[in-house]
Image (cartoon, rainbow, N blue to C red):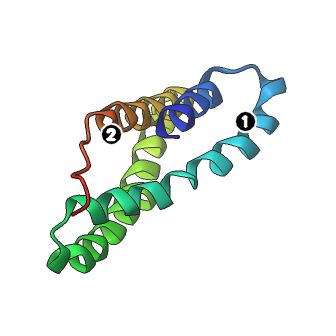
Amino acid sequence: MLLLTGLITVLLGLAPLSWIIALVFLQPALAVCFFPAGFAALAQISPPAARNVAISFAVPCGFFVGAGLTPAMIGMLADAGSFKWGIVLVGGFIISGGLTALKLRIPARR
């Protein structure tokens, strides 16, 4: 889902104007599909005694990056005249997260 979300985000920055409405509806619909799998993976790679702490730290850190640093970065690039490249860069970050997730090895249940 992260790879597909990243691709759609990159397309948001590069696609012709006629595609934007469809992409604006599609991108967030795909983005939220990551969370159940992400939380499940986080719970599986955390020791049982620390699962609640791992989730408790992941949510505010993710919110800080997703609702704080990322919009600020896009805004700085927009002020420099490169709004579309800010969106493309965010899509690239999302794609890199998806590629990194492919390397994740979930331990077998005991």
Q: Residues within 10 Å of mark 1 (few under 14, many from 20)?
A: some
**Under tag 1, what secondary structure?**
helix
**Amino acid residing under circle 1:** Leu
| Residue 16 drawn at (x, y percent) | 75, 19
Q: Residue at x 21, y 63 (%)?
A: 110
Toward which corner of the image does residue 9 lie, by quadrant? Answer: top right
The residue that label 2 is drawn on is 101
Q: Residue furthest right?
A: 18
Closer-to-camera residue (76/55):
55
**Amino acid residing under circle 2:** Ala
The residue that label 1 is drawn on is 23
Q: Residues within 10 Å of mark 2 (few under 14, many from 20)?
A: some
**What is the spatial separation of the Cα atoms under label 1 and label 2, in whole angstroms?**
24 Å
92 sits to left or right of 23: left
Q: Residue at x 47, y 51 (%)?
A: 71
Closer-to-camera residue (88/61):
61
Q: Residue at x 55, y 28 (%)?
A: 7
| Residue 35 drawn at (x, y percent) | 48, 59
84 sits to left or right of 47: right
Of the two numbered discs 1 and 2 in the rendering, the one whose residue sits closer to the viewer: 2
> Residue 58, relative to residue 106: is it above or below?
below
> Residue 7, relative to residue 41: is it above or below?
above
Q: Residue at x 38, y 61 (%)?
A: 40
> Residue 71, relative to residue 8: is it above or below?
below
